[in-house]
Image (tube, rainbow, N blue to C red):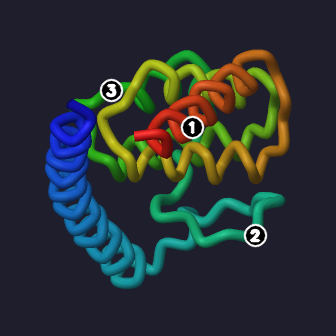
Amino acid sequence: MFAVLRIGIAWVQAQKKKEEVLKSQQQDTIEKQTKLKTDTNSLTNTTVNTEYFSVDPAPALQEVEGKEETLESLGMKLQDQSLSLFQRYAALFTLRNKGTAAAADVIATSALCDESSALLRHEVAYVLGQMQVSTPIVLSLLTKVTLLIFFLNIF
């Protein structure tokens, strides 16, 4: 019985890996297109100075006409599976740049509710590590991930 379960788990993981490779290729294409547009138009306003010294796969969203996006709207964009991974990343990095516990909660909540992309979950984990914010919601996400890893290693 455990052998059948292992085979089933391996098959599901292989299918998810195929999907993630495709998403990764799409993300890479979008990044290259964005960089080309930025280089061509000499737009320097897509770079935001933050305390995080990392090269993000998508630029953070900029204020439009002096209006800053709310945490709620950014959280909705982060969870919206109809948006491209690039757009969801932009919302993620905008939340990270806010650097508040409330922003970390929005990020963690989206990760708890959304299991559509392993790439996005990876970036969420990385961003939460950068933020170094500990809230009950962030801790519940870490507990869920720890239990998942524990059970996957058993089987």
Residue 10 in the image: x percent, y percent? 22, 49
In 3D space, how far apart are the residues under numbered discs 3 and 2 (Cα atoms)?
Answer: 27 Å
Q: Within 10 angstroms of label 3, few (less than 14), some, or many (20 or more) residues?
A: some
Q: Earlier in the sequence, mark 3 or mark 2?
A: 2
* 24 left or right, relative to 76: left
Q: Amino acid at mark 1?
A: Phe
Helix, strand or loop for disc 1:
helix
Describe residue 36's horizontal placement relative to residue 131 as left or right: left
Q: Mark 3 vs mark 1: which is more N-terminal?
A: 3
Q: Nearer the viewer, residue 7 or 25?
A: 7
Disc 3, disc 2: CB below 8 Å? no
Q: Earlier in the sequence, mark 2 or mark 1?
A: 2
* Neighbour tally class for label 2: few under 14, some 14-19, many 20 plus, Cα within 10 Å: few
x then y, percent, for residue 5: 22, 34
Task: Give the SS element for disc 3.
Answer: loop
For mark 1, what is the residue? 150
**Are the residues at dot 2 and dot 1 in contact (C-beta closer than 8 Å)?**
no
Q: Amino acid at mark 2?
A: Phe
Question: Residue 35 at what x, y percent from top left?
Answer: 38, 76
- Crowding near the residue tagged with mark 1, few <14, some 14–19, many ≥20 C-alpha atoms within 10 Å: few
Q: Which residue is mark 2?
A: 53
In three-dimensional space, the C-alpha distance between marks 3 and 1, rounded to whole angstroms, equals 29 Å
Query: Is 73 located above or below residue 56 in the figure?
Result: above
> Label 3: which residue?
80
Q: Nearer the viewer, residue 72 or 36?
A: 72
Quadrant for residue 98, please give it: top right
Left or right placement of residue 17 versus residue 50 in this view: left
CA–CA distance in space, label 2 to label 1: 32 Å
Is 78 left, or right, of 20 in this rendering?
right
Amino acid type of the residue that numbered disc 3 sits on in the rendered structure = Asp
Residue extending furthest toward the front: 1
